[in-house]
Image (tube, helix red, strand yellow):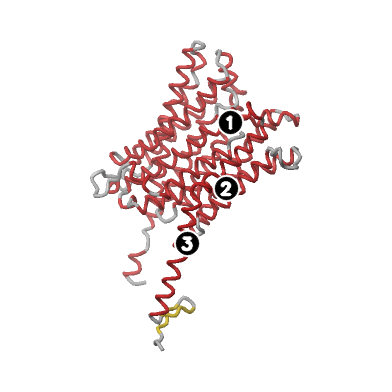
Amino acid sequence: MDATKSSLLPKPKEGLKKKFVISAMIVSNFIAWSCLSLMAPFFPIEAKMKGLGETVIGLIYSSSELVIFLMSPLMGRLISTVSPRFFYITGILVIGVTGILFGVLDKSPPYVPFTATCFAVRMTQATGVASLISASFMIASQNYPENIGTIYGILETAVGLGFMAGPAMGGGLYQLGGYGLPFWVLGGCTFACGLASWILLPAKQRTQECSATDDKDQSVWTIFTSPWVWFGSCTNICAYGAGLIWMPVLSLHLKQFHLSQVAIGLMYTIPPGMYAITTPLWGYLIDWKIPPPVLILTGLILLSILCLVFGPAPFLPLQNDMVTCVVTLVLMGLCMGPVIVSSIKCMVEGARNLGFDANGANFGVVGGVVQSSVCLGTLVSPLLGGSLTERFGFAWMMVAGAIIALIPIILFGPFLAYVAYDKCKSKAAKKNYDTLNGEVTVDNDIVMTALK
């Protein structure tokens, strides 16, 4: 092998370093999101004993999503002034410390003091999550710029598995050792993961790309000049809004089948489990040039149909049985994967078209906007699900979910049609140009022919 070709090959140490960084991010995201979600099975019980009502308990849960929604773009911008490594490690450490602190809140006086401390600790923890996810997105984009779909799919798998494992581990540890044990164990593991990342991760993550003094230092608002970013954000919000609208009322809906609490808990794990398992596959397929808009449109249409079946919609001649519920939840999880990963790809490409790839620091803004759209969807969907079910019932609530899933198609259908028409027109023009210049393509070889 000559020197020219060998110089083009990646250095073995560089490849190992990238794999180690991504592996550390996978483990960190899994543990961090497990710590964030572990309180679901038992916290309402403890909160009730402290005098809190269902509305306040719901607000404590949703406050984390609101903080992540508001802080993610800011974190993405601040990364450009320091480094993604700093925000990544700081985010993990904050999640771990606040997780441990949550384990002593049962010693707080009831009513207002308990409520105030819960909000304070939960919102601080959410700030750490915003820091972690924005830095993770940027580090992934720097290390694997050509395979961002695959890498993001793998990270989403870690997040989904963390959300699944967190409640299960939290419930088991709570039954084993009471209120504090789940927070102390998972919070301690998260903090230890942050310390390990501090010691083992490379001290410099392309610092030349993290400087705020680069030529192209994009504004947070610049990214919203791209229609693809708006399309991806709207898709994220509506997909999560439709795909999770049933979460706050599913247990009430399943009571008619006389299931145990364990069985009802397992039903909640079906969609995130299917989503977590399949997202790497969808990311791989998208990186292999399957058009993201095609997957988005197909997934949203199927998701809308599944919402109608899950109700079932009052105007459909369908039976409400257990088999339908299970199958529908499985298919919902499968549909969410291509829609979410494809929407991220659209937002990334829209940002690159604006020049965000010229400065790696600016790419943190993309991660912040991505996570903000995700959190807005997960924040709105439970609120809509609870209020609509209370007013109109479960079946009509799912009809609303079906409509929400179609909103991106309705709003951006003309834009996507224009893009498809323009692309076809460009291909036809190129073909005519090649023909006029005497170029004929045969088996991927270009053969010059004389004009007659």
Mark 2 belongs to which amino acid? Answer: Leu
Q: Residue at x 33, y 39 (%)?
A: 77
Secondary structure at numbered mark 1: helix
* Position of residue 225 in the picture relative to residue 444 (left or right): left
Check disc 1 and report the residue beneath it. 167
Residue 448 point in image, percent of width and height: 40, 83
Label 3 Cα crowd, 10 Å radius (few <14 / some 14-19 / many 20+): few
In the foreground, 332 or 139: 332
Q: CA distance from mark 1 to mark 2?
A: 28 Å
Dot placed on the residue nearer the N-terminal end, 1 or 3? 1
Decide which of 94, 356 is in the foreground and name it: 356
Q: Residue at x 52, y 35 (%)?
A: 378
Nearer to the camera, 22 or 260 = 260
Mark 1 neighbour class, 10 Å CA radius: few under 14, some 14 to 19, many 20 or more: many
Closer to the chain start, of discs 1 and 2, is 1
Q: Is residue 46 above or below residue 227?
A: above
List the residue tagged with mark 2.
Answer: 300
Instruction: Name the quarter where the N terminus is drawn.
Output: bottom left
* Apparent side of residue 444 relative to residue 393 in the rendered image (left or right): left
Spot occupied by residue 105 in the image (x, y as percentages of width and height): 49, 17
Describe the element under mark 3 as helix, strand or loop: helix
Residue 421 is marked as 3
